[in-house]
């Protein structure tokens, strides 16, 4: 007796929970692997998963089993040369010394790493775990409101383009039935009577003429009921509801003066990419505006931003001014969450730094959600750092960090977006 | 007989599977294979990987180690380092067998004969399975276990339950009864009794907590050891006696213990079980072929798979990784049939009790009443030792080199046979560790004793395992070993930093 069951359509992810348990348990190790990986990985490749490697001994499940040594007797097949009493050189360790069949094999001293892949989402989860976008809740609803059109039933008035044909015709049919029902009934009766009269041996001509006239009149009346009328029409109705916006724009500002070499720019790029990935987790659509500057600022595309070489002095305020203009022009505050990250090696024309403070405090910091400044340098800080430090002390949505080497990037990124940054700052 | 073969695919349909199944069932009955009803489930490769990671069970509680197993299976499979098994079969009633979607029709037929009639009849007939497992209740029990552990996770947190399960898994092989018959109960009863057990167990534990000495002098006079006899079922002992555990923890230990017990027969009948199933898929399909029901193309594909399965690489092959249980088991079954049907003088001398008897009776008798160890020592014939060219390597740790012990000659047969049999004796392969003493009047420390087999020491993992045992027991745990001078040496303890001495 047997019966077949086709299970192929059943869920195949029965092990998902167990897999999650595994990742949960080894989060610490996996996280380490992830933060190591972020520095090794190509900067353009933050949208794929990651291959994770954990030392085998960390995840072993210990059981009692027999160790090496002792007296053993093993059976092997395929004897082609041995006789009883033959002596054989002990093979180098690791071969043939097992503890017989079963058990033991994967609990041995093997130091192989346990390698497996995590998906993109898992990778990003781990990468950005415990981080949050600062200042997000505060004014989400009161300020960042955008109207969104929703369907809201049907109404009698509207534009022809919103006409709902099915409903309109349904209305028309109902009206036509209602308006002609009594006439149709009478018509049917009259036709029956007429037929009866015509069957009589001597048809009463008078009555027949009358009936025929009535029938003609009824038919005309029925035909006169309009196929469709104004009050049959139904239009789809829409209304606008407030909808919290999920649009974000990210400003990348970078100093491209002579003092910034390619290595420094690469570090900045890694930082921008991290930020971009992080923002994609909260916002659906993100626009990125690249502003580079030396003594003058210019809005450029990505390629130019990272790879074109410029020389000259440095005036940071030019970039800030340009950013302010772009914000006013294209990203009116109501609709957009504005984030900005500025990377620089700290050089600035000394007289310009107070000017930067002014633009920042009076204009930009009022408009942006968060402004992060990273200084990539191994030298001493200059005037810009000190000016910014003063801003950081008085403004919640401004943060600054110092990056020296590539290894600093990810820790510093975490530092900038650590959860409850504000509460900690306030306390 | 007439040659009128069934459609041989290679693509299968459910109609064709039914047709083949009916034919196979008919032949199986002809050979008196008694089986549970079959529930044959067609699954995909992904589902097969799921089944792998849960040791083939259709349901199981959640634990990271299953996730680890799944991840490594998935990795290996995706990289092409390993193929998946064609089938998995579960010792349950009805007997659940998984067929993989991508098998060809001949493969599906092979798998049905192998799993649904071979393994299935073994599960139903073999004495170990009859004694230790209850096929009708296992699925219910697994459902109960899964739900109960999920409830515990909700109540006590995932970490707590996970730690407990880790510890239980470390001692899982020491959670089996070897001599007592377990009770068979359904899920309904299990739930009812679980409540009662909770209350009862807690009251028992209080014995260990009793602080008022009844009469100190008397106690000194006769020092009663607890437990009075060494206990080999460590998990059982912990479940019943660990002082600090809460009742839900005892229940979880019990679940792990029960599942371990369920797998205990499988670990002891690998050669027989696979040999039996392989013998029957071979015999059934050949019977059908002789009846003219199978095409030549079908047979060629079948024989190709079959010979792959029963291939035994020699010791010096790069594919060699021990004795292939399919090869050994299958050849022994075939050999038993040969000895019954065409005994030689040698066979008559070695196997007077069944040489020349009815082969089917003898095979059924062998399947029903043996496990690997005894099966080999009873039925391995000199001819098979010659065919396999078996030889023994003696590895004495005091000698600088290895020595060849016995080979396939007259002097060697007995020796080879008993060595091979011993190699399948679980109690030789698993360290013999038993609970020896609990210091009931003192610090409640637990002492275990390791009795080495052939001077083989315990592997280093013992320290890790003791940590798990310590977690379960709640007080100091010591592991002793008797050294050459007959004195007890402590070879591991937990916690390590001990203030005494």
Image: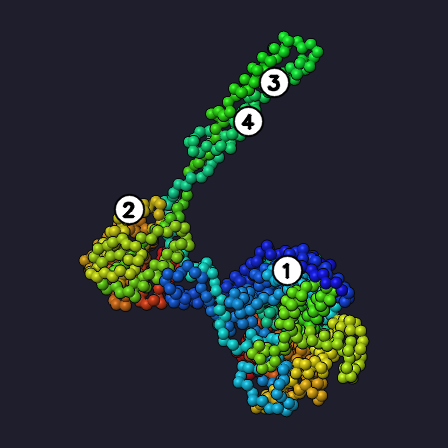
First reached walking from the N terminus: tag 3 or tag 4: 4
Give the residue at x 59% y 83%: B457
Give the residue at x 66% y 61%: B8
Give the numbered dot on residue A189: none
Place residue B404 in its image quadrant.
bottom right
Task: Specify few, some or many for label 3: CA neighbours under 10 Å numbering under 14, 14-19, or 20 or more.
Answer: many
Image check: A45 left or right of A199? Answer: left
Which residue bears the numbered disc 3?
Answer: A187
For label 3, the SS is helix
Task: Specify few, some or many for label 4: CA neighbours under 10 Å numbering under 14, 14-19, or 20 or more.
Answer: few
Place residue A42 in its image quadrant.
bottom left
Which residue bears the numbered disc 4?
Answer: A174
Q: Nearer the viewer, mark 1 or mark 4?
A: 1
Place residue B347 in its image quadrant.
bottom right
Which residue bears the numbered disc 1?
Answer: B9
First reached walking from the N terminus: tag 3 or tag 2: 3
Visible in this render: residue B82?
Answer: yes
Observer-nearest of A73 and A197:
A197
Which residue bears the numbered disc 2?
Answer: A328
């Amino acid at each position: 007796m047997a019966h077949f069951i086709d299970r192929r359509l059943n869920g195949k992810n029965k092990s998902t929970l167990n897999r999650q348990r595994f990742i949960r348990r080894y989060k610490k190790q996996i996280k380490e692997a992830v933060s190591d990986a972020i520095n090794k990985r190509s900067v353009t490749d933050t949208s794929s998963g990651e291959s994770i490697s954990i030392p085998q001994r960390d995840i072993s499940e210990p059981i009692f089993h027999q160790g090496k040594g002792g007296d053993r007797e093993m059976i092997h097949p395929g004897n082609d040369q041995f006789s009883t009493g033959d002596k054989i050189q002990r093979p180098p360790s690791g071969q043939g010394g097992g503890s017989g069949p079963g058990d033991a094999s994967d609990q041995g001293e093997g130091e192989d790493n346990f390698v497996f892949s995590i998906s993109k989402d898992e990778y990003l989860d781990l990468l950005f775990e415990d981080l949050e976008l600062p200042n997000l809740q505060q004014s989400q609803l009161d300020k960042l409101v955008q109207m969104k059109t929703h369907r809201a039933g049907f109404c009698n008035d509207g534009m022809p383009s919103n006409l709902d044909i099915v409903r309109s015709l349904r209305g028309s049919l109902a009206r036509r039935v209602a308006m002609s029902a009594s006439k149709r009934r009478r018509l049917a009766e009259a036709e029956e009577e007429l037929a009866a009269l015509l069957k009589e041996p001597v048809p009463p001509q008078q009555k027949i003429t009358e009936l025929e006239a009535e029938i003609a009149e009824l038919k005309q009346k029925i035909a006169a009921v309009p196929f469709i009328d104004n009050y049959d029409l139904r239009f789809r109705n829409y209304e606008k509801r407030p909808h919290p916006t999920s649009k974000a724009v990210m400003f990348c500002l970078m100093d491209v003066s002579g003092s910034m070499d390619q290595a420094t720019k690469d570090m900045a790029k890694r930082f921008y990419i991290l930020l971009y990935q992080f923002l994609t987790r909260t916002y659906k659509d993100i626009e990125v505006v690249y502003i580079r500057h030396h003594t003058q600022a210019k809005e450029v595309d990505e390629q130019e931003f990272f790879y074109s070489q410029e020389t000259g002095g440095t005036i940071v305020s030019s970039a800030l001014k340009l950013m302010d203009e772009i914000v006013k022009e294209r990203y009116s505050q109501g609709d957009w969450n504005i984030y900005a990250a500025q990377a620089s090696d700290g050089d600035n024309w000394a007289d310009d730094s107070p000017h930067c403070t002014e633009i920042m405090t009076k204009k930009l910091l009022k408009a942006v959600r968060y402004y992060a400044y990273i200084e990539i340098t191994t030298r001493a800080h200059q005037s810009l750092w000190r000016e910014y430090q003063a801003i950081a002390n008085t403004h919640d949505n401004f943060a600054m960090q110092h990056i020296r080497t590539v290894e600093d990037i990810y820790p510093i990124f975490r530092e900038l977006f650590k959860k409850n940054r504000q509460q900690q700052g306030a306390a | 007989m007439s040659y009128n073969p069934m459609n041989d695919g290679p693509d299968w349909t459910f109609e064709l599977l039914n047709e083949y199944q009916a034919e196979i069932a008919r032949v199986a009955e002809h050979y008196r294979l008694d089986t549970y009803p079959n529930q044959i489930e067609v699954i995909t490769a992904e589902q097969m990987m799921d089944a792998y990671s849960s040791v083939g069970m259709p349901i199981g509680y959640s634990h990271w180690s299953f996730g680890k197993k799944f991840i490594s299976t998935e990795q290996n499979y995706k990289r092409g380092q390993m193929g998946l098994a064609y089938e998995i079969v579960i010792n349950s009633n009805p007997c659940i067998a998984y067929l993989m979607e991508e098998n060809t029709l001949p493969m599906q037929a092979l798998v049905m004969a192998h799993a649904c009639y071979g393994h299935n009849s073994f599960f139903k007939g073999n004495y170990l399975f009859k004694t230790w497992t209850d096929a009708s209740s296992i699925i219910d029990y697994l459902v109960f276990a899964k739900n109960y552990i999920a409830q515990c996770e909700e109540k006590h947190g995932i970490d707590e339950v996970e730690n407990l399960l880790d510890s239980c898994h470390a001692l899982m092989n020491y959670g089996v009864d070897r001599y007592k018959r377990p009770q068979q109960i359904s899920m309904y009863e299990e739930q009812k009794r679980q409540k009662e057990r909770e209350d009862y167990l807690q009251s028992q534990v209080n014995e260990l907590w009793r602080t008022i000495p009844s009469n100190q002098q008397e106690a000194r006079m006769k020092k009663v050891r607890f437990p009075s006899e060494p206990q080999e079922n460590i998990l059982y002992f912990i479940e019943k006696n660990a002082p600090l555990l809460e009742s839900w923890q005892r229940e979880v230990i019990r679940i792990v213990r029960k599942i371990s017990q369920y797998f205990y027969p499988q670990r002891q009948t690998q050669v027989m079980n696979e040999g039996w199933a392989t013998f029957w898929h071979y015999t059934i399909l050949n019977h059908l072929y002789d009846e003219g029901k199978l095409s030549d193309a079908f047979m060629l594909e079948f024989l190709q798979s079959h010979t792959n399965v029963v291939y035994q690489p020699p010791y010096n092959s790069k594919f060699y990784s021990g004795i292939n249980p399919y090869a050994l088991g299958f050849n022994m079954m075939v050999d038993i049939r040969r000895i019954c049907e065409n005994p030689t003088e040698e066979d008559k001398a070695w196997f007077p009790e069944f040489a020349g008897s009815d082969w089917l009776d003898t095979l059924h008798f062998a399947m029903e009443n043996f496990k690997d160890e005894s099966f080999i020592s009873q039925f391995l014939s000199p001819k098979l030792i010659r065919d396999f060219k078996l030889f023994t390597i003696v590895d004495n740790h005091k000698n600088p080199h290895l020595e060849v012990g016995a080979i396939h000659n007259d002097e060697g047969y007995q020796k080879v046979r008993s060595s091979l049999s011993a190699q399948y004796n679980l109690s030789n392969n698993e360290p013999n560790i038993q609970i020896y003493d609990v210091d009931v009047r003192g610090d409640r420390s637990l002492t275990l004793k390791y009795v080495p087999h052939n001077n083989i020491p315990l592997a280093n993992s013992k320290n890790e395992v003791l940590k798990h045992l310590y977690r379960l027991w709640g007080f100091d745990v010591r592991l002793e070993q008797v050294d050459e001078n007959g004195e007890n040496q402590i070879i591991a303890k937990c916690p390590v930093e001990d203030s005494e001495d």
